[in-house]
Amino acid sequence: MKFVDEATIKVAAGNGGNGCLSFRREKYIPRGGPNGGDGGNGGDVLLVTDPALNTLVDFRYQRHYQAANGRPGMGSNCTGANGDDRLIRVPAGTLVYDDETGSYLGELLHSGEQLCVARGGERGLGNTRFKSSTNRAPRKTTAGQPGEIRTLRLELKLLADVGLLGMPNAGKSTLIRAISAARPKVAPYPFTTLYPNLGVVRIAADASFVVADIPGLIRGAAQGAGLGTRFLRHLSRTRLLLHLVDAAPLAGIRQAIEEVREIVEELQEFSPDLAARERWLVLNKLDLLPTAEHRAQSESIRQALEWQGPLFQISALSGEGCEALSLVVMQRLNELDGVMDKVAADDA
C-alpha cells in the first residue's frame, strides 16, 4: 500500500428539512387547527479513528463526502427524520485543518475517537409552532438551514515510541528489520527508504514498543532538500530518538562526525522542541571494523563530539548488540511512563 500522509478533501453536512404547512382536516371537526410538523436536522460529518488504517491513501481516490439531508415535516404533527451522519475513517495521529482559513480543528489519537468537522443544518419549524391565542391559523413556517461545507486538509503524524534518525544508508531500515517483523526495502544505495516504516519491537508477551524509520536526512533537509523533510514531523510524537551513525564510513571518522553534526543542525532548524528530545547515539556497521578497533572507534567519536549521552555499538546486519539495545530502550520507555504517571497523580 502506498504511504500518503497529506490529503485535501471536501465535506458537506446535510441540510435541515423544511417545516410543514398543514391543517387538521377531519369529518365533523371544523377548524381543526394547524398540525404541520418540524423538519429533521441535517446529518453531521464526523472523522473517526480506525486502528486498521495507517495511511491517508484512500483520500486520493475519494475527495468529496456528503451527509444526508433532514426530511421535511409532515401533517398530523409528524416530524421529519434526521439525516444520517457521515462517518469518515482516518488513521490514528491525523491532524485536521480548515484549508480555506488555515484554522486548526483538532486531532484524532485514540481508537474510536470522533471529531465533528461539519455541522448539519437546523430543522425548519412547522406552522404548529406559531399558533397562539391570537393566531389560531398560522401559515408561517421556516425552511431548514443549510449544512456546513468545508475543505479540510488532513495531515498524518505517525504514533511511535522511538524514532530512527540518520543519513542515507546509515542502516535504519536494516535495524528495524533486525528488531521487528517489519520488512522495509534494503539496498546498497542512498534513499532506499522513500516513505516512513513502522515496526513493533516485542520484548515479552506484555512488553513492546513501536519504532518509526523515516527516509535519510541530508544537508538542507529543513529547507526541503532530499526526502526526510517531508517526514520529519512523524518524529514529533516519539519519546526517544535513536541517531544511527555509520561507524565505518569510507572517508574515515571525520565523515561520521560531520554527519552527526549535520543531523543535529537540521533538527534544530526544523524544530527546537524535536532537537531537545532525548537522543541516543547508535554506532552501526561495526561488522566492517576489526573487533579490536570497536572500542577505540567509539571512544574517538565520543570525544570528538563531546558526547555525554548514551552510546551503543551495534551491527544491524549481523544483529550484534541489537537485542541489548532493544532491552535498554524498553527499560527507558517504562521509566518515562512512570514519570508521566507520577506527574498525572500530582496534578490530580
Image (cartoon, rainbow, N blue to C red):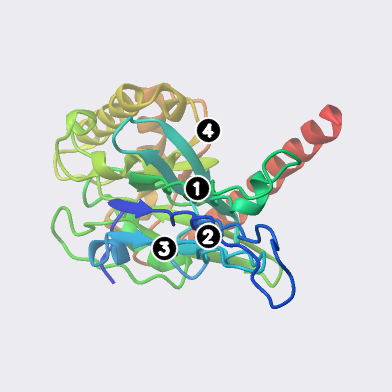
Question: Which amino acid lies under the numbered mark 3 shown in the image of this protein?
Answer: Asn
**Residue bearing the label numbered 4:** 278
**Residue bearing the label numbered 3:** 54
What number is the disc on residue 119?
1
Question: Which amino acid lies under the numbered mark 4 shown in the image of this protein?
Answer: Glu
**Residue bearing the label numbered 2:** 49
For marks 1 and 3, give the one nearer the viewer. Answer: 1
Question: Quadrant of the image for the N terminus?
Answer: bottom left
Element at badge 2?
A: strand
Residue at the spot x=28%, y=58% of the render? 4
Residue at the spot x=16%, y=62% of the render? 188
Q: Nearer the viewer, residue 153 or 111?
A: 153
Q: CA distance from mark 3 to mark 2?
A: 10 Å
For marks 3 and 2, give the one nearer the viewer. Answer: 2
* Among numbered discs 1 and 3, the one appearing first in the sequence: 3
**Residue 32 location (% of width, % of height):** 70, 63
* Residue 282 seen in the figure: no
Q: CA distance from mark 3 to mark 4?
A: 26 Å
Callout 2 crowding tier (Cα within 10 Å): few <14, some 14–19, many ≥20: many
Element at badge 3?
A: loop
